[in-house]
Amino acid sequence: MGTFSLKEKYFKFILYILVIVLINIAGVTLFFRADLTRGSLYSLSPASMDVVETLSEPLSIKAFFSKDLPAPHNNTERYLRDLLEEYAGRGGEYFNYAFYNVSADEGTLTQRADENRDMAKSYGIQPVQIRIMENDEIKFKNAYMGIVIIHGDLIEKIEAVTSTQGLEYQLTTAIQKMNKKVSALSRLDEKVSVSMYLSSSLNTIAPLIGLDQLPELGKAVAQTLTRLNAKSLGVLDVKQFDISDKTELDELGKKYELMALSWPALPDKNIAEGSGAAGIVIEYKGKTATLPLIKAVQLPIIGTTYQMADPAALEGDMNAVVEKLIGINKDLGFLSGHGSLSLAPDRMAMMQGRPSESLEAFNSLASSRYSVKPVDLKTGTIPDGLNCLIIARPTQKFSDYELFQIDQALMKGTSLAFISDSFQEGPAGGMGMPPAQVPIDTGLEKLLIHYGIRINKAYVLDRQCYKHQAPREMGGGEQNIYFAPLLKEASINTEPEFMANIKGLIVMQISPLERVEENIDKGKITVTRLFFLFGRILAHGRHDQFKPHVHHPSGKKGGDEIL
């Protein structure tokens, strides 16, 4: 009996060991993780899963981060590690990533860290300045927090990862764009023609127009073109032209909008009469685009000055043009004219030191993911195939035919994005009175009403608003800017995926939107409210609890929702 008991103990012991070994083997071979955070912060969105699962060629990500980053940047790095692990889990053998410790200070770490820093610089990743708190003091230090995405010969980069907000979107869109570009480049049945026109005759007048480095420009641009061609799977057919004949340059200027310079003879400076051009013409299947290598800028008082293209920035500009011509990105239409906002820089505002009203920042962000096409209804029509037509704060009247074109574009499947104001600021009043607010009537209002939305001629004022710290000479203290309501998370509809990460907004001089219920076809039109306000306001010297105050310049009052 005792012998049997001893055998039984040995058997159980061996069985336990066997179970433990099997569990460990299962733990190594089977991977399982669950995201229990609110909102599934560490889980990929369905769009990200689809993109990374459709990779057909290896893609690698190099993350360059300085060691021992202070909060909150250490949390950003940790979030990025978890996010890349999720991508790797979905991408399998085609998705790889690695983190590289770097230091912004020369020789402070090991030789490996110095090599990593040199690698980061070779990809164009530079340190950024961050603020840290040490011993109750605010200090600044340089740190690397950049990402490089490599897919074949293509390279995309995110130079500064300073926040977790929108990081997955940036990564997914970059991966999707690169995947599309590899497919598009491999399908091309003819090469993209790239012609560089740079006249050596310009070198004689370069010092006179402030371009002493012009003789070196040709070599630098040629290197840029070679580098871009290598990253574009060799699809660029690059040619260089040195033309100084005025008649030939005039013909090229008319055909490609290539800027040509002509100058008279200057005997005192030993310069003969001549002509020259500096620009790059990119052509593909009848479509052309021109990038200037020299720009003429008109400045008040100073007059005409000349600026030479930066070869380092030129690669990005050319890459965007090539992507646009071969049709990698989706098309966005941007309505020009009718007093709408411009995508070009407002140079006059910059020189006068006043805020710019251009959408230059929007254009820069949108152009990295979309092909932005200007649409002028006075000289043309809305092209078919646009994914979206953006109408940004027009102030001039649309004709009935122009409104018909916009309506027809919507009927054909083109999305419309309206950025609209109810009033236009007029000239300042006398005796220190504020500028007049002139109502805007473009005709688009009746089109919106037809689809069930009315923009009321009013401003929303709310007590929960932006607070401005007044300077001492103006009395100091905190001032409420009632026409800049503060929208908190409770006032934001985060159910749509594109709204999920918006936690708060400050909106300025907004007008309330009203649903025109009788015009909304419930079977065809769905109205989604994104923002609304229900807050405390200051009215007539007392605090009241009700809907936000709506100020009508005509003196009317009311309560409305913000859609």
Image (cartoon, rainbow, N blue to C red):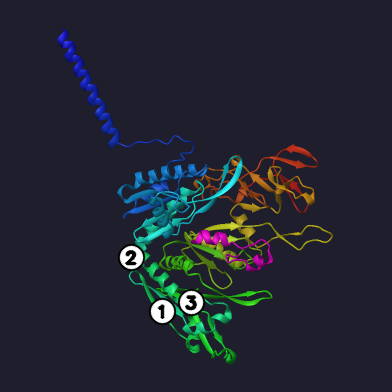
> Residues under labels 2 and 1: Cα distance?
26 Å
Residue under numbered circle 3: 279
Image side of residue 525 versus residue 102, left or right: right
Disc 3 from disc 1: Cα separation: 10 Å
Determine which residue is flagged by label 1. 240
Secondary structure type for disc 3: strand
Pointer 2 with pointer 1, Cβ within 8 A = no
Residue 34 in percent (x, y) is at 40, 35
- The residue that disc 2 covers is 187
Q: Amino acid at mark 2?
A: Arg
- Callout 1 secondary element: strand
> In the image, what residue type sits under mark 1?
Gln
Q: Is residue 459 above or below residue 399?
A: above
Q: Is residue 480 visible?
A: yes
Residue 344 belongs to magenta span: yes
Does residue 461 lie above or below 124 as drawn? above
Q: Is residue 446 magenta?
A: no
Left or right: where 21 falls relative to 126 = left
Q: Residue at x 56, y 43 (%)?
A: 493
